[in-house]
Amino acid sequence: MMGLCGRATPRAVRHWGFASLSLALLLGCDTPVASEGELTAIEFSGIPFPAVIVGDTLRDSFGVATPLQATAYDGRGAVIAGVDFRFLSPDTGVTIGATGFLTTTRASGTIRVFASLGTLQSARRTIVVTPRPDTVSAMGSTRLTLDYVLPDGAANLTSDIGVSVRNLSGPTATPGNVVGWPVRWQLIYRGDTLSPGDTTIAVLQSNAGRRGVVDTTSTSGMSIRRLRVFSNRLPVATDSFQVVAEVRRHGRPVAGSPIRYWVRITPKS
């Protein structure tokens, strides 16, 4: 008797169960088996920070110069260790050393970076070049009031709650807006910081409606959140929240940070 793929099938194999036979047919006899340890894919897995300061080396959130990193995988999805990647950029004013440390002399803009290994190249990653963040200030009053409606609806949303991150002066930076710099937001209710995934009573979101507590400054140097309150779940009619924005450089708060907003909420009359 001829078995799968035209090979002779021993009598003992003729009585395979239906599930085993179906699996063999599904896989197909001409499907190559991925080799263990054979390079199949690479992932650009490590940019230590989304922005680099003008004239500086790319650093992590604590200010430590940190190299770019990538990961190699074999055909079975296992990580291949001990490989040497090349990191490339088509942009001028950028130097990437053999060990992955990136330095820039660009005054502004973005840096496009790729990881390369053998004949494979990763997807593009982007790093923003920005002036040094020297100061953080509030946008408008730090005391707001939200008159919410019942039953709950999309109208239960504050006006913009924003901060501005700017450079004042420096030997390697032009005064102006700081672009692409991380801002971490916190939502505090009755003394407790609500977790990012907690949607019980209220959440922070962008103007576009995306929820989240980590943002990067826009081209105007601004980061903006809005407080969305779920009025059906409030334990009392009149209450308050605290919204906090924190900006750090090299692990330390930038002057003016953190900025605290107080939001008083009351039912709409």
Image (cartoon, rainbow, N blue to C red):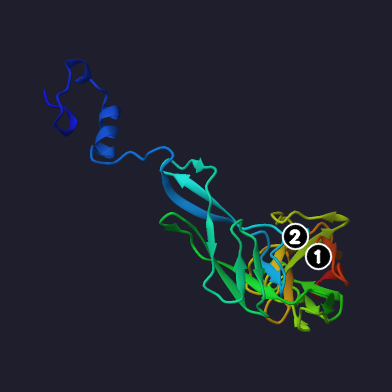
Question: In the current view of this chain or complex, which residue is farthest to the top?
Answer: 12
| Residue 157 can be seen in this image | no
Circle 1 SS class: strand
Q: Position of residue 167 (x, y in %)?
A: 80, 79
Q: Nearer the viewer, residue 117 or 165?
A: 117
Q: Position of residue 142 (x, y in %)?
A: 87, 75
Q: Nearer the viewer, residue 235 or 40?
A: 40
| Residue 68 can be seen in this image | yes
Residue at the image point whose x is 53% and y is 58% from the top? 86
Q: Position of residue 114 (x, y in %)?
A: 52, 63
Write down the quadrant of residue 110 in the picture. Answer: bottom right
Circle 2 SS class: loop
> Is 221 located above or below residue 57 in the figure?
below
Q: Which mark is residue 264?
A: none
> Is 234 located above or below residue 155 in the figure?
above
Q: Quadrant of the N terminus?
A: top left
Callouts 1 and 2 close, C-beta under 8 Å: yes
Write down the quadrant of residue 55 in the picture. Answer: bottom right
Residue 155 placement, left or right of 125: right
Q: Quadrant of the C terminus?
A: bottom right
Q: Position of residue 143 (x, y in %)?
A: 87, 75
> Is 86 located above or below residue 207 in the figure?
above
Q: Amino acid at mark 2?
A: Ser
Q: Which mark is residue 61?
A: 2
Q: Nearer the viewer, residue 188 or 69?
A: 69
Residue at the image point whose x is 53% and y is 54% from the top? 85
Name the N-terminal-most of marks 1 and 2: 2
Q: Which mark is residue 248?
A: 1
Q: Amino acid at mark 1?
A: Arg
Rate crowding at label 2 as few (under 14), some (14 to 19) or many (20 or more) other CA atoms within 10 Å. some
Residue at the image point whose x is 81% and y is 60% from the top? 251
